[in-house]
Image (cartoon, rainbow, N blue to C red):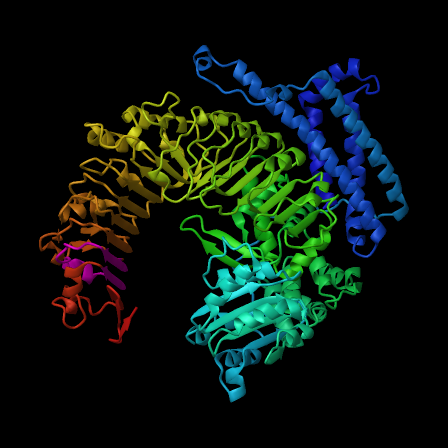
Amino acid sequence: MARALVSTIIDQLGSLIASEFTGRLGSLFASEVMSIVNVEEEVEKLKLKFQAIQAKLDDAEERQVKEKAVKLWLERLNDVFYEMGDVLDEWNTAKIKTDIEKEEKAETSAAKRRKVLSLTNLNSSVYTVSQRRDIALQIKKITGKLDEIDREGDMYQFVLTSGNEEVDPRPPTDSHVDVSNILGRDRVKGDLVSSLLGKGNEEERSLHVISLVGMGGVGKTTLAQLAYNDSEVNSAHFEKKGWVCVSSPFNKFMVAKAIIQAFGGDDSNSTLWSSLMNKMCDLIRGRKLFLVLDDVWTEDFTLWEPFRLALQNAAQGSRILVTTRNNRVAEVMGSAKRINLEELSDDDCWSIFSTIAFSDRDSEQRKDLEEIGRKISDKCKGLPLAARTLGSLMRFKSRKEQWEMVFHSRLWELQDVERGLFAPLLLSYYDLPSPLRRCFSYCAVFPKDYVFSEEDLVSMWMAQGYIKSNANMERIVAREYLEILIIRSLFQDFRYYGYKENIMSFKMHDIVHDLAQFMAKNECNTINGYEESRPYLQNARHLYLESPQNAQILKSIYSAKNLRTLIFVGLRAHNLSKLFQHFKRLRTLTLSYQHSGTKAMKLPDAIGNLLHLRYLKIHYYSGDRLPETICNLCNLQILNIAIHFRNELKKLPQGMSKLINLKHLILEEKDFGTRKFKFPREIGRLSSLTKLSHFCVGGKDDSQRCGLGELKYLNHLQGTLKIYGLGNVVDACEAKNAELKKKIGLCDLYLYFSEENVGNHGGRMEIDVSVLNALEPPPGLEILRIGRYRGTTMFPNWMVSLAKLKRLTLTHCENLERLPPLGKLQFLEDLLICGASFPFRKVGAEFLGIESENKKDDIIKIFPNLKTLSFDSLRNWEEWIGIGGQEEEDCIVIMPCLQRLLISQCPKIKSLPDFLFKTSLQEFTVVKSPILSRLYRRSTGEDWAKISHIPEIQINSIQVQRDGQEVIR
């Protein structure tokens, strides 16, 4: 990590030399600090010193693996780098605060009449001559430390290099094939599945615990996952399945909680061991279960005994699958069967390696590299993780001499307990550019088996200053860094969620995690609050702290005086004020509150002390306010608050406009639109915002009303924006002033027309129509949701121009007399109309929007790309008459791509038009719509013949498949 740290500092020093620091401060220091004749000269000298040390770091970082003295030297150097980074950040923070004050003083007289809340402790933002002198003295002191460390480094005779700082563009990922899941394991997988299903003799049918034993990286977890998701296992009628990663050290409280959660139980109110065990026994008793306990290390029989007794309450045929590296663990856990997972054969190992390493290569290149490639593959020693990692490394080396260098690397000399598995991982690590090494090592702060979120991880990297890029490209570069680490096989177990943004989650193999911990030793620490032993924290920079319920903050963590990251899980009634006063150098702070009934958990005013903070995420916040002092955090870039469902955060602080570096403002809560929430005025000054999850228009009677016009200058917004309180918009001019059309980065827009005093404005229906017409979204919008709209008609003139609109949802439109002509939307793929407040009783031809503008090649195409159509909770809907017999005409094509049709909770609807069943429909579902249920009932329904060709039909709880079999769900 040292090389990446020094690179960042050199960039900062270069900026400092070019800034007003040298001009303005130089003259001030000349009279105040006689020892510093020329500030610019001092800073330039320090920059040259860092550059000289930088040339030694490649050799030093590689030698630290085998030479303890070199590792200690690097740790001392890292301390100085961090210290220098803090000094430079203090100066930058002071400058930002000074700029804020200048802007406030320069406001117009009209702006001065507004009640602007001053920042707490703002006097500290204008650095005095004395404070500036202190910064200069700190720089001089650090230079002295650096000289001393540099002289000591001469004795190691480091080889000087230019280093690997540049990150190559991300290579293509579509040809990367992970074949380790399937090669060489067919026989053992079949044996494992057979044992899980109880096939074989009487002894096998009654066995309870099966242990999968093998060295790290041999594929135990992968094999267990294959068995866990096997189709035969899934159809074996286990009542409950659960997966628990145990890891080391064994913590009986955490394992018990994990088992309870895996089987669908709730442990939030359990604080005693006896209570946890009772809950576990209740969940298990009499049920046929399949439980995987992955990565078990403990050999202590007394720790396992309570779990063994509890699991004996499960029904016959239950299975427990244990993965472990230790045969003794298998004995302690009373395994009835043990499967020893051996290394792969040389041929299987070569297949994994070559499939990845030679992807995208022509036959001539493969022929030239195959001989040396087989020698490298032999060094994998039959471990699929090593083969996959080395294959990923060699994939990006095109010259034969590069392959030769890997084969002859001195890292192969390492004798690790895992028989050299670290060697291929280290080769991959040292091949990374230094910025990527630092991003990878940072992951060591999280516990093993942690599920990473792509969005959170890249945001934390940015908060730590790990991404070298201009402000507009920073997140794009961070995502490219992540994708390179993924391609290098340093992450695994990928999952995707979210409709448009396709958010990714993933994990890190436990041995890869061991490598990250090794490279970040002492800097990244994880503490489980149940543990009795405490790691050495004096040099810690990043800390993950998990605390049991009702426990006090561990006093030992206060020795970590220089923390830059604190991830606090299980927060309850702790003294956060002391915490915030102590850790003033934090860049990243995550607070996960425990559920605490109806008791509010508030953020203390001391949060304002964390002036270096860039990233603040709070889970389950239950206070009714955020402290105004949060507006002191002028460096803050990410503010993400998940609101506890039992309490209401009623407003944001009035001084939010002072957070001039804020890029993400995310509020997470279900049913956000049903509550009164106030946004402060002047939030539109946060022009750096790229993500704003919600925006609430203030009520007309609010003296500090936040109008829709505050969105005018937020043109960098991306992704999803939900606007609430559109019923409070005064007129179309206010709506037009939001200039939504200019926010071209938006792809998902939610327009919610609730207001504070619903029903008290007689002309509201007409105003809603004019407001919707004026809210023209950007032309690239892909998802549009409109809720609580009170106009009698709907189809703004801008809707047809949304050429990329794929999903449209209309909910609870209480005055809409008929459906708009949505058939005109040529690119729409998904349409949902729901909400009992829709008053219309009939859907007619107007819904299809048949006009000449739909005509293409003499054919009128209606909903030409619609794939999913859903009607839900339309209590008054009685009739859908289609187009009056015209559907037989050859010139009209209706919904040619329709695949899924859902009619749910529409009790009065009598029939459906025939054109629906002449489409490419694959799924037809009717739920709680009794007339349709009778009409389309299998065989006996009057219109069964019209739908019998559809592959999947669900009428209430009955699913009818093509083969004529009925399955009751």
- Residue at 52 percent of width and 27 percent of height: 628
- In this view, the residue in front, 934 or 598, is 598
Query: Which image quadrant for residue 555?
Result: top right
Q: Is residue 922 magenta?
A: yes
At which x and y percent is residue 59? Answer: 80, 50
Q: For this view, does 701 lie left or right of residue 12?
A: left
Spot the residue most to the top. Answer: 109
- Residue at 28 percent of width and 36 percent of height: 798
Number of numbered tags placed on the structure image: 0
At which x and y percent is residue 699? Answer: 33, 27
Spot the residue most to the bottom. Answer: 201
At which x and y percent is residue 646? Answer: 41, 43
Q: Is residue 239 visible from the viewing direction of this image?
A: yes
- Residue at 51 percent of width and 73 percent of height: 227
Quadrant for the C terminus in the image: bottom left
At which x and y percent is residue 481? Answer: 60, 48
Residue 742 sits above or below residue 672 on the image: above
Q: For this view, does 558 lie left or right of residue 622?
A: right
Q: Is residue 185 visible from the viewing direction of this image?
A: no
- In this view, the residue in front, 208 or 785, is 208
Residue 460 sits above or below residue 399 on the image: above
- In this view, the residue in front, 939 or 627, is 627
Q: Is residue 340 magenta?
A: no
- In this view, the residue in front, 702 or 31, is 702
Q: Which residues are magenta?
A: 898-927
Query: Which image quadrant for residue 553?
Result: top right
